[in-house]
Amino acid sequence: MPLSRWSAPELAREAMERGIAAFVSASTVRHWLDQDALKPWQHRSWIFITDPGFLGEGRTCP
């Protein structure tokens, strides 16, 4: 699952499991994301091409 789909509790749990923090609450994670310029939930996915002319005529996505 992409990180942009993770909830604050899931991110907090992952940070503790990976040893990034001994303890971090979901509210702290929400605060960090709110203060950071990175807001993946506010951006459209770049993976899905929406421009029909992107590949050129006669070409298709794999």
Image (cartoon, grey):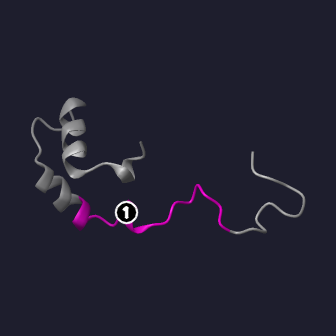
Residue 5 x/y as whole percent: 36, 51
Is residue 52 shown in magenta? no
| Quadrant where the C terminus is found in the figure | top right
- Left-right relation of 46 to 11: right
Is residue 41 shown in magenta? yes
Q: Which residues are magenta?
A: 33-50
Above or below: residue 18 compared with residue 6: above
Question: Is disc 1 surrounded by few (<14), some (14 to 19) or many (20+) residues within 10 Å?
Answer: few
- Left-right relation of 22 to 2: left
Residue 34 x/y as whole percent: 23, 66
Residue 49 placement: quadrant: bottom right
Q: Residue at x 79, y 69 (%)?
A: 53
Q: Decide whether the magenta segment is chiefly helix, strand or loop.
A: loop
Dot 1 falls on a residue whose secondary structure is: helix
Q: Residue at x 35, y 64 (%)?
A: 39
Question: How many numbered discs sit on the rendered protein?
Answer: 1
Q: Residue at x 31, y 48 (%)?
A: 6
The residue beneath circle 1 is: 41
